[in-house]
Amino acid sequence: TGVGDQVSEVFDFTVVDSDGGIGVPGSLTIDINDDGPSFTLVNDGLDIDDTVTISSLNPDADTVYTEQFADWFFGADGFGSINLSALPSNVEVDSTTADKIVLNLKEGSTVVGILTLNADGTDSLEVMHRDGEIIFIPIAATSATAGGPEGSLLVDLDTSASFNILVSGSDGDEVPDEFSSPDHDLVNTSNNGWAVKGDHGQTNELGESILFSFVDDDDDTTGFAIGDFKFTTEGYTQGITIATITVKVYLNADLSNYDEITIDVTSGQIVAVSEQDWSANAGTADYILGDGLYAVEIISAEAEGSFRLNGIEVGDNSETVPDDLAFENIGIEIVDADGDTDSQVFSVFINGTAGDELTVEAIVGTSGDDILLGGAEDDLIFGGAGSDELTGDAGADIFAYSAGDGGATLAAADLITDFTDTSDLIGLENLVLGNADGEVAFVAANTLGLGGSATDTAMIINQGAGFSEVLAIIQNTLAIDMTNADTTIL
């Protein structure tokens, strides 16, 4: 047992011809070697540590990216075990089988990514959307002051802002602007807060509301959009400690588009519009963080008591992006049935910057026949030796070649399935393009020439001494259309 262990069998033989003649006796030695498990890097770069590095941005919604990161096999001895003991503290095992490994990538106790590795096939990384931290940028603040009931109250923010606040009320019935006989829609102000006069006049009861509209400093009939709004509820009555309120935000100047939520609050709790969960469908429009607020209305939905409003603060908001996360040196060891091992290291980076992009190191094949799939971004694809099938997918891809990557015949060459003449390139390592007119002829060793059929192009190199090597067949691309502009030196 053990990789490199060898069993030798010696066979003695004698050759006898049809006439009975006996030749000189000989012997034949057959060496039987024990193989071992092995990772084959499908997605890796030219970095010397051979770590498979995967990087993602922060998508707008949870997103699954499919790529080929690495494959593995156990050899003739078969599956023994998978050892995942060398994991960083922010990576946990979800499940393992001989053919599949699923790892959870965590920020604290929250799963922010799921890395799925398959022994032979497409792998995936699911990246969860992460919200940034909302920072309130204050512009002006105001509190209620004593004064008689008014139909509407203009709060002048002076030089601290280029807008003012217009405060109005409603008792919740179908009749608007009840300012006299009855005067239920008047705003009643005191040092303790704002309330609707309604039936009692000192607090906001079920169905009653206060509307804070934002108007231009030069013209209080012109609406003005602000970035964020804060308020508090206080002065609870009837022994309540929690009040149920509806917060309605208006998203256009004529106040026809609005979104709303209903929440429970405690006395003195600061409520910021930007910090609430607006994901439920309500109102005539959807509030999205960053939308301008033309007005905010607070409606009492509390049946057991009442309250006043105070502590108004208007401002803007800014979202700081989530932290960049690193899941480095994820060590995976595969063990076959007689204890032979191989290991591979993966590192995953999830950036806090918004975007829908997965970046994997250059795609590298094995010495065998590989099927290599690029992703939606720009890929660098090394097929290596063997008869490989290469697909770049979207993006501006580079298909990389050097002497020894092809074969002696067309059948032994690579197949490039989706080369795009205007964006993809052929990367040449220690090779130059010997002709640019579609002719097969070329003159110097390690010089690339082009030939092909009515639909495809064959890339052929002169390796000297009269031997040519066919590197690849480029499907659906004419040799006559290939020029130096379609190549790049690696």
Image (cartoon, helix red, strand yellow):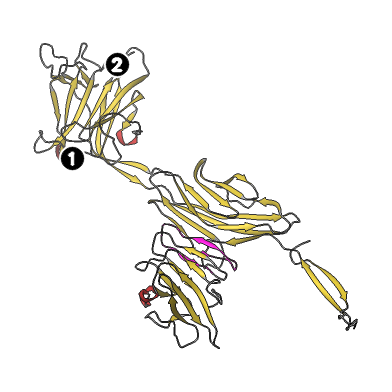
* Residue 47, x across and y down, in percent: 52, 67
- Per the rendering, the mark at residue 225 is none
Which amino acid does the dot numbered 2 rest on?
Ser
Q: Residue furthest front?
A: 19
**Residue at x 24% of width, y 18% of height:** 208
Q: Quadrant of the C terminus?
A: bottom left
Give above or below for 390 relative to 349: below
| Crowd tier of the residue under label 1, counting other residues whose Cα lies within 10 Å: few below 14, some 14–19, many 20 or above | few
Quadrant in the rendering for residue 335: bottom right
Quadrant in the rendering for residue 223: top left
Q: Which residue is mark 1?
A: 160
Q: Quadrant of the N terminus?
A: bottom right
The answer to if 246 sits in the magenta stretch is no
Of callouts 1 and 2, the N-terminal one = 1
**Label 1 element class:** helix
C-alpha span from label 1 to label 2:
32 Å
**Residue at x 36% of width, y 13% of height:** 239
Left or right for 231, reference 387: left
* Residue 282, x across and y down, in percent: 30, 29
For the record, the magenta segment spans: 363-383
* Residue 460, x across and y down, in percent: 48, 78
| Crowd tier of the residue under label 2, counting other residues whose Cα lies within 10 Å: few below 14, some 14–19, many 20 or above | many
Magenta span: predominant SS is loop
Quadrant in the rendering for residue 186: top left
**Residue at x 76% of width, y 56% of height:** 338
User: Taking the image as drawn, is residue 402 in sight?
Assistant: no
- Per the rendering, the mark at residue 306 is 2
The answer to if 381 sits in the magenta stretch is yes
